[in-house]
Every structure is written in C-alpha cells, then in structure tokens.
Amino acid sequence: MALNIREADGKDLESVLSVYREAGLDIDGSLDLKEAAEVLKRMNQYPNHKVYVAQVNGQIAGTFTLLVMDNLGHKGARSGIVEAVAVLPSFQGKGIGKEMMKYAMDRCKEDRCYKMMLSSNEGRTGAHAFYESLGFIRHGFSYRIEL
C-alpha cells in the first residue's frame, strides 16, 4: 500500500467532502463544492491552517485539518489543533488514521508546539479507543498529547 499524505488543494475538495460523508462526519449534510472552495480559500489565508489528504495508490482515503496556533500564554509556545479526521470505511483498520495522526504530530513538533489537541464526539467510542492507542489522554471531552 503506497500511502502519501499531502496538503489538499481545490481539486481535492469533492473527494474530501465524500470522505466526510462516507465516514459519517457530515451526516447532517455537507457543503457544496462552491461553499467548500470559499472555506478552503479562507483557511489558506491563515498561517499554519491546512487541510491534508491521505492518498492510497492515488486515491484519497482519508483527511484531517491541522491548525498550528500561536499563544501569548505558555511562554509563547504554539499548540496544534486537529479537526475533521476521517478515513473512508473501506480503508479503516489499515493504519491510515494512525499515519495521519503521526504526520500531524510531526508537523506540530517541527513547529515547536507544546501540545496537540483534538475533540471527539462523546458517542464515538471507537474513535476514543483509537486516539488513546496513539497516546492521547482524555482531557474533559477532548484529547491531548504532550509533544
């Protein structure tokens, strides 16, 4: 399995939205392509706010968003926030989510973040077990990993 994780661009939006739907992230509906392009354009105006895709043999199998933000607290140390983590059901259980999270952690380490956080819906117990297997620690209803 040839896995490639890279920053998403406008050509990837249809696939990203499809991953969200199929993985159950957007069960209440999703953006249309025009709206998604506008949101991606705004996101790209932020420094260090990126959508990533995981490709398996050229097919987009997963996606996540990473925001690395500056802080005035914590002596100015940055923190990373991961959002919208999703893997197509047909690719789940193959290590793609793990590789995406390792990639996000590596980006945060490179950017000298002191932590990386994510939140997960309370009912997604399978996702909770996955994040805990990677070293995330339950922090209220969010997860946190020291970097």
Image (spheres, helix red, strand yellow):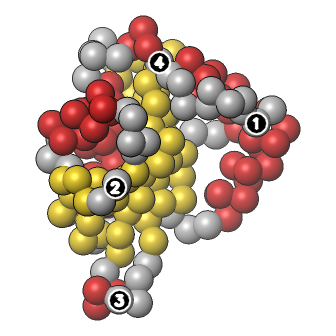
Please give the residue where the numbered disc 2 appears in the rendered image.
Answer: 142
Please give the residue where the numbered disc 4 appears in the rendered image.
Answer: 88
Q: Earlier in the sequence, mark 2 or mark 4?
A: 4
Tag 3: residue type? Gly
Most foreground residue, 81 or 24: 24
- Of the two numbered discs 2 and 4 in the rendering, the one whose residue sits closer to the viewer: 2
Q: Secondary structure at mark 1?
A: loop
Q: Earlier in the sequence, mark 3 or mark 4?
A: 3
- Of the two numbered discs 1 and 2 in the rendering, the one whose residue sits closer to the viewer: 2
Tag 2: residue type? Ser
Q: Horizontal and vertical percent for residue 82?
A: 42, 52
Q: Earlier in the sequence, mark 3 or mark 2?
A: 3
Q: Earlier in the sequence, mark 1 or mark 2?
A: 1
Q: Are marks 3 and 2 in contact (CB under 8 Å)?
A: no
Looking at the picture, does residue 134 appear above or below residue 89? below
Q: Secondary structure at mark 2?
A: strand
Residue 55 in view of the camera: no
Spatial separation of the CA atoms under disc 1 and disc 2: 25 Å
Q: Are marks 3 and 4 in contact (CB under 8 Å)?
A: no
Q: Callout 3 environment at 10 Å: few (<14), some (14 to 19), or many (20+)?
A: few
Q: Are marks 1 and 2 in contact (CB under 8 Å)?
A: no
